[in-house]
Image (tube, rainbow, N blue to C red):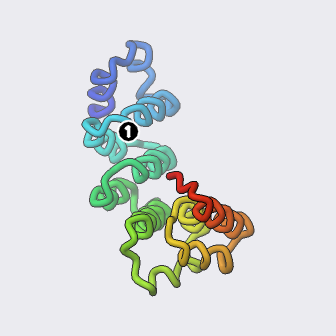
Amino acid sequence: MEPLHELARRLGASASVVDRLATDEHARWAMLSEALGDIALHPLVLAATRAEPDSMMAASVVMSALEVVAPAERVSWVAALPAEERAHAARRADDLGMLDRVLAGVTSPDEVASLPDRTPWLQLRVAGTARDPAVLDLLESRGTTRRVRGAARQRLIDLRKGRTGG
């Protein structure tokens, strides 16, 4: 529990929180979630995640971390999980990489064409944030859920009206 205690110290956690860290997953989750907001604490959060006895909790921390860490660090976070828990996190890391490429406008035509075969989570994120009308047209017509198709349609409308948002 050493990384957790160092996190507790750096976050100024109360003695009662520190006392509960070994037995209270809610206290650990709250501290790890808070620490993800400070990039300087990410190495300690990663170490604490590797030592986390509850694999579901570790997976939850990793899924949250994947959204905030640098793309090059995602592999390390997925590897922090036990082998049997990595598949979902690896898929999410891959989806986030694709999302990064779509938003940067550096996807190949083949990658764009593959979007309807990707996870609904990725499709929905792309549909709500992409600026490329070709990508949005594809998801509007071939997205796997009604929600994805509707989000792509709404994003196209917003872009045409000059409301580009995030």
Q: Which residue is mark 1?
A: 36
Number of residue marks? 1
Find residue 146 and report its image quarter. Answer: bottom right
Establish if 26 lies above or below 85: above
The local crowd at label 1, few if under 14, some if 14 to 19, many if 20 or more residues have their Cα within 10 Å, is many
Relative image position of residue 88 (x, y in whole percent): 50, 63
Query: Which residue, as the protein is rendered here, is positioned at the far front?
Result: 161
> Residue placed at 58% from the left, 72% from the top?
136
Of 114 and 60, which appears nearest the observer? Answer: 114
Establish if 129 lies above or below 94: above
Find residue 20 and report its image quarter. Answer: top left
> Residue placed at 43% from the left, 64% from the top?
103
Disc 1 residue type? Leu
Establish if 46 lies above or below 77: above
Find residue 7 and report its image quarter. Answer: top left
Query: Which residue, as the protein is rendered here, is positioned at the far right?
Result: 146
Q: Is residue 84 visible?
A: no
- Which quadrant of the rendered structure holds the N terminus? top left
Does 113 sit left or right of 66 as displayed?
right
> Residue placed at 29% from the left, 39% from the top?
39
Establish if 90 lies above or below 18: below
Query: Which residue, as the protein is rendered here, is positioned at the far top?
Result: 15
Of 9 and 125, which appears nearest the observer? Answer: 125
Relative image position of residue 86 (x, y in whole percent): 43, 62
Relative image position of residue 42 (x, y in whole percent): 29, 41
Of 151 and 76, which appears nearest the observer? Answer: 151
> Residue placed at 48% from the left, 27% from the top?
27
Does 106 sit left or right of 134 as displayed?
left
Q: Which SS class for mark 1?
A: loop
Relative image position of residue 6 (x, y in whole percent): 26, 27
Q: Is residue 140 visible?
A: yes
